[in-house]
Amino acid sequence: MLEAQLEKLGREMGRNSGNSGKPPSSDSVTQRAEQGQERLSRQERRRQMREKAKKFMSEKVKRRPGKQPGAAGAALARAEVADHRELHVPDKCRCCGESLDGAEVVGSEARQVHDLPVRRLEVTEHEAQSRRCRCGAVTKAPFPKQAIATTCYGPIVRATAIYLMIGQHVPVARTAELLSQMCGAPVSTGWLAGLPAEAAGGLGGFLDELREQLRAADVLHADETSARVSGAVYWAHVASNDLLTLLDCHEHRGIDAVTDMAVLPFFKGVLVSDRYRTYWSIDGITHALCLSHLLRDLASVATSPAHRDWADKMADLLVEAKDAVEAAVVAGRDGLNTRELRLFRSRYTRLLERGFSTVPARHQPGTANRDAYNLLCCFRDRRHEVTRYWADPAVPATNNQAERDLRMVKLQRKISGCFRTFAGAKAFCAVRSYLQTARKHGVDGLDILVQLFKGTPWMPPRAVSPP
C-alpha cells in the first residue's frame, strides 16, 4: 500500500503540460528543461519517420523556410486615380542658380503616399419627412437603422470599436482612448460597454444559419474550456470546422450546454474530439479521437519504465500513419492502400498485446498500471475511432481546429480580464463566431461589422454540392 501511495505521489509531481491537461504556465523550470530534451528526442524520431513516409510519395516536395515559390505576395498597390494631387516644381537651377520660372519641362516622376484622412468625424443629418395623403392620413418616412438617436455614432465608428474590443481584444478603456484620439470627439467607456450586446442582437439570423450549416457538415470539431464570469467558473464551448465557427458560453460543461448550442444533437457526421464522455453520449454521431490528446496520454504512461516501450512505439506508430496518410494525399491518392492499412493495423494489434502483457492482473487506482490499463482499453475498444484518419483522409487526425477557435476566449481573458456579466460573455461569443467564420471565408472583419450595424449582416455562403 505504501509503495502504491509513493508511486501515485511521484506521478502527480511528474505531471506537466506535456503529459497531462495542465497549462504550460504551471510548469517549473526543471520540468521545462526536461520537456525540452524530450521534445528534441521526439522530434528526432518524428524526423526519421517522416523520411520513411516520403517513400510513399511519387515525388518529393521540398519546403524551404520563409516565403514559398509561387506564393502570393502582399504589396501596396498604386491607385489608378489619386484623391489629391500636389505638383512640386524646382525654383532655381542646381548648377548656376538661375530661376526656372517658365523653363521647359523635360520629365516628371510620380510617387503616391497612402495615408489616413484627417482625424475628423463626418456628420450626416438624416431628416424624415411626414406627408399627408389625399385621404388625410399622415405618413412619416422611417430613419435608417444607423440613426438610432438624435445624435449617435455611425456604423463605421461602431464597427471599429467592436473590431478593437472583440476582434483584437483591446480593453474598453484603451479602446475609448484610441477612438477619442482618432475621431477627435470624446468616446465614453459606458457606450462602448453596451456595444457588444447591440452587435450580438443583430446576429440572430446569422447564428441560425450558422447552426444549420454546422448540422449539415460532414466533419465537425468540438471542445470546451473554462471561462471566468464575475469571478465564477463558466464554460466556453465550440463547434467548428475549417469554414465555420460557433462559440457559446454556458454555466455548465456537460450535456446541458451541448443541448443549448443546438448543433451536436442534430449532427450525423464525424465528430473529432477528446475522450470527454458528454460527446460520446450523443446518439447518431460517428466519432474520431484526437491524436494530440492520445499522444499526451501516451507520454504520461511512458513515464513509467514498465510501460515506456509499448507507449513510445504506439506513439511512433500513430504519427507514422499520420505522415503516411498526408504523403499519400500529396501524391494524389485517396489515402492509404489496402496493403499499407493492413501493415499499420497489424502493428497496432501487436502493440496492444504487448501493452496488456505489461499490466499486472491486480492494479490499484492512481498507479501507472491503472492508467496504462485504462489507456489500453481505450485503444482496444475505440480502435476505429483512434485510427479513423487512416482510412478516411477527410477526417483530421487532431482536434487542433477546435482548440485554435477556443484560444480566443483565453486570449480575451489574458488581455482584457474576465467577463463582467454572463450576457457579456454570450455577446462576445456571438460576435467572435461572426468574425472567425468570416475570416475562414477570407472576408474582411471590419467590413462585415459595418454591414452588421447597417442592419444587413454578412451570411456564410452555403457549400455547393457536387453534381
Image (tube, rainbow, N blue to C red):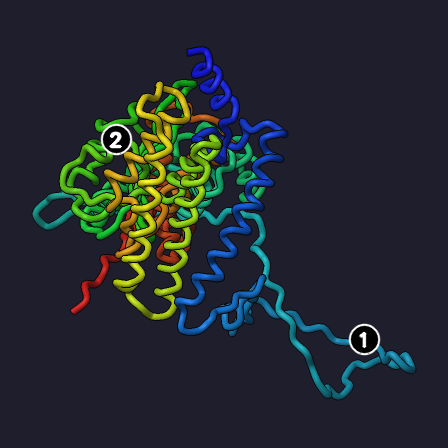
Q: Residue 91 carries which label?
A: 1
Mark 1 vs mark 2, CA separation in Å = 81 Å
Residue at (62% x, 69% y) in the render: 112
Q: Where is residue 265 in the image (x, y as percent from the top left)?
A: 17, 38
Instruction: Check the picture and name the quadrant holding the N terminus.
Output: top left
Secondary element at tag 2: helix
In this rendering, does residue 138 appear at all? yes
Where residue 20 appears, x then y in whole percent? 44, 31
Q: In the rendered image of this protein, does residue 45 appear above or below residue 307? A: below
Residue at (35% x, 40% y) in the render: 354
Tell us which disc is closer to us: 1 or 2. 2
The tag earlier along the polypeptide, 1 or 2, is 1
Q: Give the side of residue 198 with respect to residue 79, left or right.
A: left
Foreground: 111 or 170? Answer: 170
Amino acid type at image mark 1? Asp
84 in relation to 303, above or below: below
Q: What percent of the width, then of the height, locates residue 37?
A: 60, 40
Whether residue 146 is visible, yes or no, is no
Question: Which is nearer the eye, 447 or 127?
Answer: 447
Quadrant of the frame with the C terminus:
bottom left
Q: Quadrant of residue 293?
A: top left
Q: How many marks on residues?
A: 2
Three-letter amino acid code at the position of disc 2: Arg
Whether residue 264 is situated above or below residue 193 in the rendered picture: below
* Numbered mark located on residue 277 in the image: 2
Instruction: Say whether residue 462 is left or right of residue 426.
Output: left
Q: For the residues labelled 1 and 2, say whether their Cβ atoms are less than 8 Å apart.
A: no
> In what element is the residue under mark 1?
loop
As drawn, 371 above or below 7: below
Residue 200: image tag = none
- Residue extending farthest to the right is 96
150 or 272, which is in the foreground?
Answer: 272
